[in-house]
Image (spheres, rainbow, N blue to C red):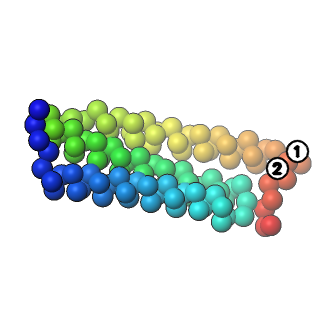
Amino acid sequence: MNAVPFWVEAIVAMLLVASGLFVVVAALGFLRLPGFFLRMHPPALTYTVGSWCVALAGTLYFSMLEGRLALHPLLVPVFLAITVPVTTLLLARVALFRATAGIWNYGEGT
């Protein structure tokens, strides 16, 4: 088993901490923003960026550990980058339909 250099572990740790900070920012966006439509966009972006940080950390760590390029951790954020905008759009369309039909009050402006 190969040893991973300290500088690699430090970079991996910084990427993982950055990912945690992005998730905290997303949670604060849920708490601070007033309405449903405003709450959709920032968490989707920050979760995607946070997942990229985790994937880059995994790619770097496992590439150094195995002595070859390990690209399999990058599959998760690629799929997230494809699916998150689609699901966000679908949620927005459903919410807009429900808001215009008067089915649900989303608390806009409160």
Q: State which quadrant residue 21 falls in.
A: bottom left
Instruction: Determine crowd level at label 1: few under 14, some 14-19, many 20+ residues with C-alpha closer than 10 A.
Output: few
Residue 61 is situated, as x and y percent measured from the top left of the image, at 22, 43
Q: Kindly identify the residue that appears in the image at 75 percent across and 46 percent down.
A: 95
- From this view, report whether residue 16 is shown above or below residue 55: below
Q: Is residue 18 visible?
A: yes
Q: Are marks 1 and 2 in contact (CB under 8 Å)?
A: yes
- Which x, y percent locates residue 70? 21, 35
Label 2 environment density (alpha carbons within 10 Å; few <14, some 14–19, many ≥20): few
Image-based side of 27 in relation to 11, left or right? right
Residue under the image location 21 percent in, 38 percent down: 62
Give the position of the C terminus as an image quadrant: bottom right
Q: Which residue is mark 1?
A: 103
Task: Identify the element where label 2 is drawn.
Answer: helix
Relative vertical location of residue 33 with respect to residue 106 in this rendering, above or below:
below
Question: Which amino acid, mark 2?
Answer: Ala
Q: Secondary structure at mark 1?
A: loop
Quarter containing the N terminus:
top left
Q: Is residue 46 left or right of residue 77?
A: right
**Coordinates of residue 91 in the picture (x, y in percent):** 67, 43
Any part of residue 68 in sight: no
Give amino acid for label 1.
Ile
Which of these two is toward me, 40 or 26?
26
- Quarter of the image for residue 26 reads bottom right
| Residue 86 placement: quadrant | top right
Name the residue that disc number 2 marks.
99
